[in-house]
Image (cartoon, helix red, strand yellow):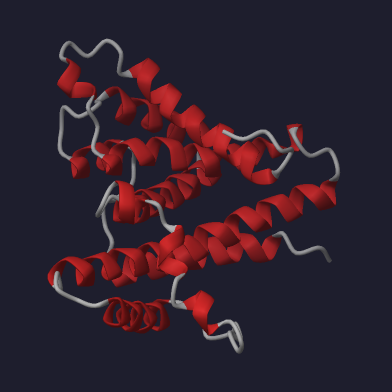
Amino acid sequence: MNSTNSLRDMVTLVHEGGHAVQSIVDRPLELVDFKNLPSEIAELASMSMELISMEHWHHYFENEHELKMAKRKHLEDVLKGLPWIACIDAFQHWIYTHPNHTAEERSDAWLQTYERFVSKVVDWSGQEPVRKLLWQKQLHIFEVPFYYIEYGFAQLGAIAMWRNYRNNPSETIEQYLDALKMGYTASIAEVYEKAGVRFDFSESYIRELAGFVTDEWEKLIDS
């Protein structure tokens, strides 16, 4: 992680802490391959830690207003991340199903995909050359093709786990640890079930979880 005294640094530290907990609790598994996790499981551990830890961010932020601002910013990033993840995944599918495309065709495909998933609020007038190259900021396209949609699956699981934590903290932590202890000795859906959440990315489930995040965000607005 970087250390620039930013909110993102703190979130990254907590995120990677979730991976560390995973490594600790699945250590007793007999075979190394049982610890070779698919990203849907690995990122569930880390992204759940981000959201669950928010209940304890007052240790970082002593000022109540700054605490609320930090939580709001993180929840905004959670919601904004889901359509961006879908956008990048859809664009990669276009790239690899059109292997002979030109640079111009690629830019056009990106703009069409981008318009499909993102907000229409931003005015890009005068910055059109930048917008058509926005996909280049996602290093996963270059380094690990198709490894990105997993963050979306895991984020949905993490939101559900945070919702569980708000209702029953002790039980949720037990479920979290029990799921991580499984490593990859069961299917992804079974690990999620052990964690007390669903491996589900249907429209209705996404709408339900997004509504929960939105409600929690609104509670953080200063009166």
The quadrant of the rendering that contains the C terminus is bottom right
| Percent x, y of residue 217 | 63, 62
Q: Residue at x 14, y 73 (%)?
A: 100
Residue 48 vs 98, above or below: the answer is above
Q: Residue at x 43, y 23 (%)?
A: 21
| Percent x, y of residue 170 | 50, 30
From the viewer's side, name the closer residue of 109 and 6: 109
Quadrant of res 111: bottom left
Quadrant of res 88: bottom left
Judge whether residue 148 can be spotted in this image.
Answer: no
The quadrant of the rendering that contains the N terminus is top right
Is 136 left, or right, of 180 in this rendering?
A: right
Q: Residue at x 29, y 41 (%)?
A: 39
Is 60 left, or right, of 206 in this rendering?
A: right
Residue 24 vs 174, above or below: the answer is above
| Percent x, y of residue 186 | 15, 32
Q: Exactly how many numbered labels are in the figure?
A: 0
Judge whether residue 129 can be spotted in this image.
Answer: yes
Q: Residue at x 58, y 82 (%)?
A: 127
Residue 141 vs 177, above or below: the answer is below
Is 40 left, or right, of 49 in this rendering?
A: left
Quadrant of res 187: top left
| Percent x, y of residue 184 | 20, 29
Residue 209 vs 166, above or below: the answer is below
From the viewer's side, name the closer residue of 25 and 122: 122
From the viewer's side, name the closer residue of 173 and 47: 47
From the viewer's side, name the closer residue of 71 and 86: 86
The residue at the far bottom in this view is 125
